[in-house]
Amino acid sequence: MKIFKYIFWLLYRVWFYILVAVPILILFPVLLISIAKESWYPFFFKIARVWAKIILIGMGFCYKIERDQTPQLDKSYMFIANHTSMTDIMLMLIAVKNPFVFVGKKELAKIPLFGFFYKRTCILVDRSSAKSRKAVFLSAQRRLAQGLSICIFPEGGVPDESIVLDAFKDGAFRLAINHKIPIVPLTFADNKERFSYTFFSGMPGKMRAKIHNFIETSQLSTEDTKALNEESRTIILNQLKDFNA
């Protein structure tokens, strides 16, 4: 009986990568055009949202988005969420309609096909390099000036599966304070159970997400970074506890 589970998990993983790759291959010419200019990014973002829906629906995930507050399309925000799964990217794209740019680790740019567009549309960071971290601030400033938002998973990576919510890095909160944009915390409840980074795991089912009330930063200074970090993490952690209650 156990062997059938492993066969299912193997095929389930392969199917995921097929769902990731095939739409990119089909839409490759259109995607190339959409990234030709930074000003065309909102068009690329719309395609990315369709791509995300294809993957989640194709994997048998039924997603439900709850909103305490809805972002205005003509404003910029700092979107943050807990990070437990490759599907976090897709769920974030579906949950948020505002065109945003991911800030992510540069290693993902090495993934075939996906990495080609990733490094051309996201802000890449090498967390071991102070120069790279400074470049993130400049890139974020340019993108915000274009009317876009920023998305960061502030745990700085995917923690061990035994950890409910890892400590947050300060980068997202310094950026938000420096650019006076609201923090929008999101909590993803089921992504770890549905499709964790453990290869032999995963199953179709519900995916719940909640967009919390925004945290304003217009009156904050860099001295408030730690407090903003802790406030944001507490919101997400408490919601995770509520989801699991």
Image (tube, grey):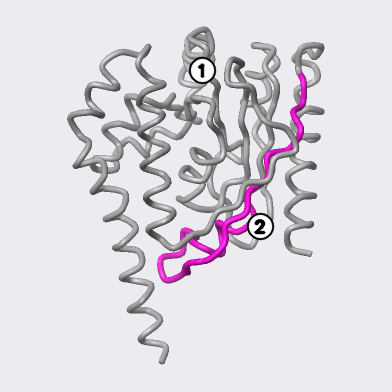
Q: Which amino acid type is marked by label 2?
A: Ile
Image coords of residue 4 (percent x, y): 36, 85
Residue 204: in magenta span: yes
Foreground: 85 or 26? 26
Q: Which mark is residue 89?
A: none
Q: Is residue 171 above or below residue 38?
A: below
**Residue at mark 1:** 148
Foreground: 186 or 69? 69
Q: Quadrant of residue 3?
A: bottom left
**Which residue occupies 73% across, 58% down?**
243
Image coords of residue 194 (percent x, y): 52, 63
Q: Is residue 7 above or below residue 41?
A: below
**Residue at mark 2:** 163
**Which residue occupies 62% across, 46% down?**
65
**Which residue occupies 64% across, 62% down?**
162
Foreground: 151 or 76? 76
Give the position of the C terminus as an image quadrant.
bottom right
CB under 8 Å between discs 1 and 2: no
Q: Is tag 1's residue or tag 2's residue first in the polypeptide sequence?
A: 1
